[in-house]
Every structure is written in structure tokens, then in C-alpha cells.
Image: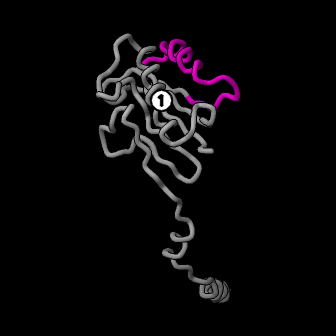
Amino acid sequence: MMRVYAMIIACLLLSVPVVSTESKAAETKINKKVITSPNAPQAVGSYSQAIQAGSFLFVSGAVGMDAAGKFVEGGVAAEAEQAMNNIDSLLKAAGTSFDNVVKTTIFLIDMADFKAVNEVYGKRFSKDFPARSTAAVQGLPLNAKVEIEVIAIIP
């Protein structure tokens, strides 16, 4: 009986058409474009400020640094405001805006800062708020107090 099962399985395996992975990759290739803005700090590692993939824009985590690479003074609210300014410049560079943001993620060093960051964040969205996650983390790049990333639609 085991031989019968083995033969059935072998026949099934042999009858499965083989598909080239190269042709599949070519069929699913998405148009990807790097988006940059001189009004936001340049990437400090091996990543892009933002990537357009089809009609979506993925903005890397923005911190409270100005275009010259200096952190703004004034605490977490000032850093959040600058991070949102950096995001705004990248959204504009891609031809979109905060109205088209569909998902955000906020990383905080201290969850006690949630209220202050939320007030800054709320000024950028008037209706149909995006989906959002907020998490407290042990550390952020360059000792930032807050980091914000977004996904937006490009009309």
C-alpha cells in the first residue's frame, strides 16, 4: 500500500508545471523611485528618505533634526514638530500631502510624552485620520526622543 501512495505522490509531483522564477519576478516588478527633499535631513545610514512604490509613498522614520542635521531645541514637542515638518517636505516632494496619509507609526522613548506628541501630530490631520501605531522603545537613532514614519497615497 505504501508503494501505491509513493507512486501517486511521484506522479503528482511530476505533473506540476515548473515556473521560472525569472518570469515571475519580471511579472511582479513594481516601479520604485527614491524621493528626497533638501528641506529634510539627509539619511544617516543605508536607507532613503522616502520611496515611492506605485501609488504609495513610504517615508522613513523622521526625527527632530533640521535640514542641516542639527536637533531642534525645546524637548519632545519641538522634535515632533520638526519631524512632521520633515515628513511634510517629503510628502510635497512626492506630490502628496498629509491629507493622503493612510498609516503612521510613532516611536517614543518615554510614553509619558504621548500627550505632547499627540497634540503636535493632531495639528497636521483635520479629518479621516490615518491608522496609527504608537510604541515606546528603548532607544532611537542619534538619541532622538521621537521618530515618526508614514505611508501615503500619491494621487
Q: How is the image coloured?
A: one colour
The image quadrant that residue 138 belongs to is top left
In the rendered image, which residue does mark 1 sit on? Answer: 148
Q: Vertical placement of 34 versus 142: above or below?
A: below
Name of the residue lying farthest toward the top = 74
Q: Percent from the top left, x then y, of residue 92?
A: 51, 36
In front of the other: 121 or 37:
37
Q: Position of residue 5 (x, y in %)?
A: 66, 84
Q: Is residue 4 above or below residue 32?
A: below
Three-letter amino acid code at disc 1?
Ile
Give the residue at x 50% y 48%: 52
Q: Is residue 153 magenta?
A: no
Task: Please report the residue visible at 65 percent of the width from the left and 84 percent of the height from the top.
Answer: 12
Q: Quadrant of the C terminus?
A: top right
- Residue 7 visible in image: yes
Q: Position of residue 46 (x, y in %)?
A: 32, 46
Task: Identify the residue at horizontal 54%, vertical 13% (top origin).
Answer: 115
- For the question of whether residue 2 can be seen, the reply is no
**Residue nearest the observer in this picture, 150 or 85:** 85
Q: Secondary structure at mark 1?
A: strand
At horizontal 52% and vertical 71% (from top left) the residue drawn is 26
Image location (x, y in percent) of residue 110: 44, 17
Answer with the quarter of the image where residue 82 lies: top left
Q: Which residue is most to the right?
A: 128
How crowded pointer 1 is (Cα within 10 Å; few <14, some 14-19, many 20+) is rated as: many
Identify the image quadrant of the N terminus.
bottom right
Range covered by the magenta-colored residues: 110-133
- Total marks placed: 1
